[in-house]
């Protein structure tokens, strides 16, 4: 957020603090909320790394900021000073690094309302656990991307001030009906959390029955691409699996319409934005029922749930040969999200409620 961007001092300000502007679900969703003057309040996003990241990557820009920059104390000091100058009535903290800023600001300015925004149904390390826990105790409200995340991470004593925020970031035009093809796709970070090693094993079982099956893996390397490529070679799938690297969202969605199945066997998730996107595009998800996925994906209705690899592969192969059942499930996947509220609608409504209330 530029220091040149000013807000009307007569209107309250809500600021969403995020570590950096990347490609993850948190950042993609946040970009759909406007930095704007609304009738009742102003809303802004503040990225911890905006100026520092640009300077550090002037010669070699990447989508993931280097740890040496992200961990630099000056990043947090400058962000805190920017927040103090802005004087927001409400601060929303996404991810543990932002929680550190929110905690200090709340201690310096107790009248500031804080929201801790949870995006994953598990703690990723001790810093994540403790900073989120402290921030939750200091928060006016706790938001989460799903009920599964709230259930997993929020104690019963704090449940009275929670709300689930929709993670539907945009509505996609429903696809035209089409016959199923043995084409599978994934998009997201190539990170152990996404369980891609298992996805490759499931695909290998499918490929053993359908030699024409293809699997396209889209996304930047999160530390696992080399191991996955070795696994592909070991499974004899070099001609059937392709790694496409990172793509922008428009390119992904245009390409995804050429596929029939979305394959993701995550070990842990919150709402799983990519699964929602795939369902809106008419792909039948073949997914593990982790996080909120198990609530909106129903086995045999709008998805194939992966509990046993062999059974999931058998169901997927059967669907490829059964156009009528495939189309019914694909249509059900699309319909799952047709009437749901958007992320930006939920966030703006929640902010308006909180900034309108007198500070507690």
Image (cartoon, helix red, strand yellow):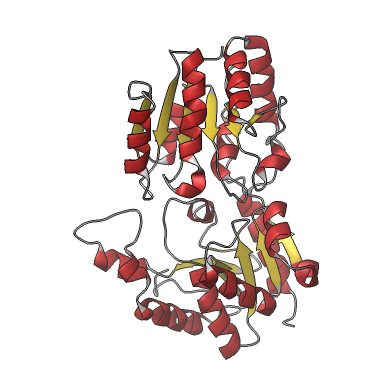
* Left or right of 80 on screen, residue 268: right
Q: Residue at x 57, y 78 (%)?
A: 88
Q: Nearer the viewer, residue 121 or 80?
A: 121
Q: Quadrant of residue 220?
A: top left
The answer to whether 164 is drawn above or below residue 273 in the figure is below
The percent coordinates of residue 56 (x first, y second) are: 25, 67
Q: Residue at x 56, y 33 (%)?
A: 278
Q: Is residue 303 visible?
A: yes
* Left or right of 348 on screen, residue 259: left
The percent coordinates of residue 286 (x first, y second) are: 59, 30
* Left or right of 257 on screen, residue 167: right
Q: Quadrant of the N terminus?
A: bottom left
Q: Nearer the viewer, residue 10 or 70?
A: 70
The answer to whether 228 is drawn above or below residue 185 in the figure is below
Q: Residue at x 66, y 68 (%)?
A: 40
Q: Residue furthest bottom?
A: 108
In this figure, what is the number of numbered marks? 0
* Left or right of 60 on screen, residue 155: right
Q: Is residue 8 visible?
A: no
Q: Quadrant of the C terminus?
A: bottom right
The percent coordinates of residue 123 (x first, y second) are: 58, 62
Q: Residue at x 51, y 20 (%)?
A: 206
The percent coordinates of residue 173 (x first, y second) are: 58, 29
Q: Nearer the viewer, residue 294 or 358?
A: 294
Q: Residue furthest front?
A: 234
The answer to whether 89 is drawn above or below residue 329 in the figure is below
Q: Quadrant of residue 21?
A: bottom left
């Amino acid at each position: 957020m530029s220091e040149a961007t000013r807000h009307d001092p007569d209107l309250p300000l809500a600021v969403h603090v995020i570590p950096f502007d990347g490609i993850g679900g948190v950042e993609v969703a946040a970009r759909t909320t406007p930095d704007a003057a609304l009738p009742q309040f102003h809303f802004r996003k503040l990225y911890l790394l905006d100026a520092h990241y640009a300077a550090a990557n002037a010669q070699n820009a990447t989508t993931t900021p280097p740890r040496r920059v992200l961990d630099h104390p000056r990043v947090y000091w400058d962000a805190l000073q920017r927040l103090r100058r802005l004087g927001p009535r409400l601060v929303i903290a996404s991810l543990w690094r932002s929680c550190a800023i929110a905690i200090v600001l709340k201690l310096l300015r107790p009248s500031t309302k804080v929201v801790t925004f949870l995006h994953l149904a598990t703690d990723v390390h001790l810093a994540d656990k403790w900073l989120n826990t402290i921030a939750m105790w200091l928060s006016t409200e706790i938001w989460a991307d799903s009920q599964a995340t709230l259930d997993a991470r929020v104690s019963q004593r704090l449940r009275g001030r929670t709300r689930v925020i929709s993670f539907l970031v945009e509505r996609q035009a429903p696809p035209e009906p089409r016959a199923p093809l043995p084409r599978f796709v994934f998009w997201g970070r190539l990170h152990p959390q996404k369980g891609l090693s298992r996805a490759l094993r499931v695909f290998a079982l499918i490929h053993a029955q359908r030699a024409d099956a293809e699997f396209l893996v889209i996304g930047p390397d999160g530390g696992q691409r080399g191991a996955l490529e070795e696994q592909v070679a070991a499974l004899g799938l070099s001609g059937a699996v392709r790694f496409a690297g990172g793509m922008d969202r428009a390119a992904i969605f245009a390409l995804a319409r050429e596929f029939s199945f979305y394959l993701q066997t995550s070990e842990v998730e919150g709402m799983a934005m990519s699964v929602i996107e795939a369902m809106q595009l008419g792909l039948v998800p073949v997914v593990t029922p982790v996080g909120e996925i198990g609530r909106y994906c129903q086995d045999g209705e709008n998805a194939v749930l992966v509990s046993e690899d062999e059974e999931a592969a058998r169901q997927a192969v059967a669907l490829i040969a059964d156009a009528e059942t495939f189309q019914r499930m694909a249509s059900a996947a699309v319909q799952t999200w047709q009437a749901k509220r958007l992320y930006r609608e939920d966030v703006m409504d929640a902010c308006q409620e909180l900034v309108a209330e007198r500070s507690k």
